[in-house]
Image: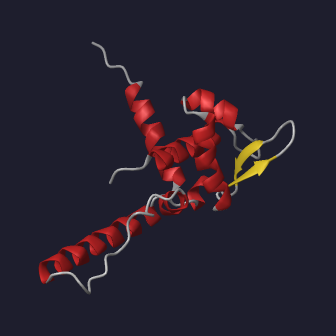
């Protein structure tokens, strides 16, 4: 499965919120944009979609920015990707006018999609953060004789 740029940037945005925000501390798009090397205007599209889905909230004022609404262990990857439009182009075909072999292929495609969605619902944002942390720790491991 390949993520759209909007989905990939949205996930990076959420990672940045966890790493640089937390405990009610907000993070600005400008700061995330600089740290992640993503255009602020493009990043806004992902942030806005996540805000509309209720995953993050925007705070106004001098200490304004974005904050996660729920803890990372309560936010599924399915919810994130759906809010970012990852599955918008994955529409089931009308099987009515398809040849029998095409109907079978369409059915299998739907089954695979359902399995992927079910799996994504089990993976939380916290799981992603934990995996990234484990990878970072393993890369810093130095073995010398």
Whether residue 29 is situated above or below residue 10 in the rendered picture: above
Whether residue 54 is situated above or below residue 114 in the rendered picture: above
Report whether 97 appears left or right of 17: left
User: Among all residues in the image, which is located at the extreme right?
Assistant: 61
Percent of width and height locating residue 71? 64, 55
Report whether 15 appears left or right of 20: left
Between 139 and 64, which is closer to the camera in this rendering?
64
Whether residue 15 is situated above or below residue 91 in the rendered picture: above
Residue 52, image quadrant:
bottom right
Indicate the quadrant containing the N terminus: top left, top right, bottom left or bottom right. Answer: bottom left
Q: How is the image coloured?
A: secondary structure
Residue 73 appears in view? yes
Percent of width and height locating residue 66? 72, 45
Percent of width and height locating residue 6? 50, 47
Between 21 and 2, which is closer to the camera in this rendering?
2
Image point 68% across, 37% down: which residue?
A: 29
Image point 87% across, 41% down: which residue?
A: 61
Residue 71 appears in view? no
Report whether 42 appears left or right of 144: right
């Amino acid at each position: 499965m390949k993520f759209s740029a909007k989905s990939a940037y949205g996930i990076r945005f959420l990672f940045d919120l966890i790493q640089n925000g937390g405990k009610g501390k907000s993070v600005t798009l400008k700061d995330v944009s600089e740290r992640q090397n993503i255009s602020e205007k493009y990043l806004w599209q992902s942030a806005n979609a996540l805000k509309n889905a209720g995953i993050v909230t925007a705070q106004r004022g001098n200490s304004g920015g974005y904050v996660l609404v729920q803890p990372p262990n309560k936010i599924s990857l399915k919810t994130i990707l759906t809010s970012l439009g990852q599955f918008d182009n994955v529409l089931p075909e009308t099987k009515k006018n398809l040849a029998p072999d095409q109907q079978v292929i369409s059915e299998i495609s739907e089954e695979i999609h359902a399995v992927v969605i079910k799996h994504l619902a089990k993976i939380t944002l916290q799981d992603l953060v934990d995996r990234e942390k484990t990878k970072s720790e393993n890369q810093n491991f130095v073995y010398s004789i």
